[in-house]
Image (cartoon, rainbow, N blue to C red):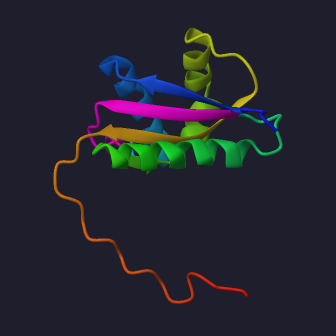
Amino acid sequence: MGKQSAIIISITNKEIRDKVSELNARAMGKSGIDPFYGAPQIIVVLADKNVPTYTHDGSLVLGNMMAEAESIGVATCWIHRAKEVFESDEGKALLEKWGIKGDYVGIGNLAVGLADAPKNAATPRKANYVYHVD
């Protein structure tokens, strides 16, 4: 339907990145840690809650970014709590400061950077993961 409910916020400014990390850690109940694993870039995806498919739309944006990043050798990790961060007074203040207006809800965050170690082997898929119906 072309609603394009999601918006993407790319954060590379260290001060802002660290503030969002702090808010995310607080939302997790573990102040003082870095939920973004030291990644130099954070991508936040929000979506307009007035669009019935906003959660799906934002999740698809995140998944597509992860697949594309992998294809070019960039590591990503989906980090939760975007909803909690941007529902907080401090999160709302950041959105206002950045000029983002509307009924946006946090869908997820990506920590983006180069991996510190080689990738682990893929975990074997669980039994009955795929069903073929003819």
x, y percentage for residue 51?
Answer: 81, 37
x, y percentage for residue 103?
Answer: 76, 27
Depicted 59 relative to depicted 82: above or below: below
Q: Nearer the viewer, residue 119 or 39?
A: 119
Q: Quadrant of the C terminus?
A: bottom right
Q: Nearer the viewer, residue 18 or 127?
A: 127
Q: Nearer the viewer, residue 127 or 33?
A: 127
Depicted 55 relative to depicted 8: above or below: below
Q: Is residue 29 visible?
A: no
Part of the protein shown in magenta: 33-47
> Which residue is painted at 51% across and 33% down in the image?
44
State left or right for residue 104 relative to residue 8.
right
State left or right for residue 23 relative to residue 46.
left
Q: Residue furthest left?
A: 117
> Which residue is painted at 47% across and 47% down in the image?
28
Depicted 64 relative to depicted 94: above or below: below
x, y percentage for residue 122?
Answer: 33, 71
Q: Quadrant of residue 43?
A: top left
Q: Residue furthest front?
A: 134
Q: Is residue 125 visible?
A: yes
> Which residue is painted at 34% across and 38% down in the image?
112
x, y percentage for residue 59?
Answer: 61, 47
Residue 42 part of the magenta segment: yes
Residue 39 part of the magenta segment: yes
> Which residue is painted at 69% across and 49% down in the image?
56
